Image: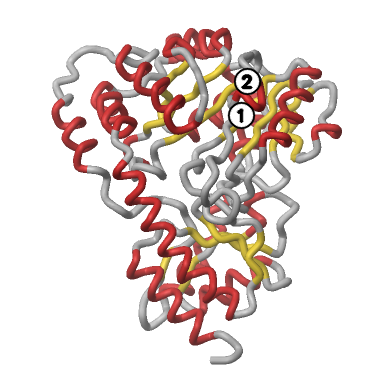
Amino acid sequence: MRGPLPDYPWDAMAPYAERAAQHPGGALNLSVGSPVDPAPQSVRDALCAATDAHGYPATAGTPRLREAIAEWYSRRRGVSVAPSAVLPTVGSKELVALLPFLLGLGAGEAVVFPRVAYPSYAMGAALVGAEAIPSDDPAEWPEHTRLVWINSPSNPDGRVLDTASLRAAVERARELGAVIVGDECYAEFGWAAPWDVERIPSILDPRVVGDDHTGVLAAYSLSKQSNLAGYRAAFVAGDAELIDRLLTVRKHAGLMSPAPVQAAMIAALEDEAHVAEQRDRYRARREVLLPALEAAGYRVDGSEAGLYLWVTRGADAWESVAEFADLGIVVGPGHFYGDHSPQHVRLALTAGDEAISAAVQRIRESAPSA
């Protein structure tokens, strides 16, 4: 039996959530990136039309779904991938946490992930007894590395890796004989130059890997771009041999996307209009929240893409969490994202327009010049 797992980090937020709830205007939750905007009607219609799902769904996904994923990669990501080299997953967090297991990793092997990162990368290593190594420098990755996670745009700090950085990471992973995976779930949301006009590159981009996907995978989710977090709709693509291995293990484990969800995914992938609308919503929220934070003395770091603002005032993150809680605003402490961000907090753009407007008003009223 492996050692005990760490406590779920968000449980530590309970006292601050209670503190925020004491605000006369009530609590505004900007801590978790869970979409609040409606799912597209076309997607809901497709889900309803597919509810007579009396048979077991295909773990590999329907042929039409795999074609839709491949077409989407070509159209939106500039990547050529065969329908046979894609695979639906039950949300992206499932893939992140289970990939070390699905690849057969264990003790004596290492999983590398960004220094400031979503905690599920480390948890995936812990679940199989592998070593978890936070590192952004490919030169530092040790010889026993067997899996590398790249997150661009990043959660929580919104940084984007250009093609040269991605290429260096892929080259080092291949030297080590490690699988490298790009977690690209926020790729539709670029805000600052050059990503406000240029496509955020995929790890499968030809400028990164040429036409060789060996050892390389890309993961994507429809939770954020299509407001489908409740659908658990995501997929992975890339190295055909790795996809075949994941498919085989997932068949044995019974990991399959429900048939109605697969139908809904097709509708979401084929409809770009709703993604543009959602992008506009997030841009509008960012354009009012960011200057309010700066006026209140917070420095916004990174955050050139994605759905969060990563801010600091130079104090310990828990101190900032408490200050926001006194304003009735719940934010996420940098401590949750590793040991390298003890003074940052994360604010999500996924709260509704009214919540963002109310938060902006409270922040502005608390600013030194107010």
Q: Residues within 10 Å of mark 1 (few under 14, many from 20)?
A: many
Comparing 306 with 324, the one in front is 306
Report the mark closest to the observer, 2 or 1. Answer: 1
Q: Position of residue 112 (x, y in %)?
A: 72, 32
Left or right position of 82 against 25: right
Residue 291's place in the image compared with 133, above or below, is below
The residue beneath circle 2 is 216
Residue 363's place in the image compared with 14, above or below, is below
Q: Residue at 30% across / 16% down in the picture?
A: 64
* Circles 2 and 1: CB atoms closer than 8 Å: yes
| Mark 2 or mark 1: whose residue is earlier in sequence | 1
Q: Residue at 76% across / 23% down in the picture?
A: 171
Comparing 326 with 77, the one in front is 77
The three-letter code of the residue at mark 1 reads: Ile
Q: Residues within 10 Å of mark 2 (few under 14, many from 20)?
A: many
Secondary structure under badge 1? loop
User: In terms of image quadrants, where is residue 270?
Assistant: top left
Q: Which mark is residue 232?
A: none
Q: Residue furthest front?
A: 197
Q: Position of residue 15 (x, y in %)?
A: 52, 67
Q: Position of residue 70 (x, y in %)?
A: 42, 20
The residue beneath circle 1 is 203
Comparing 39 with 21, the one in front is 39
Residue 22's place in the image compared with 191, above or below, is below
Q: Residue at 73% across / 45% down in the picture?
A: 115
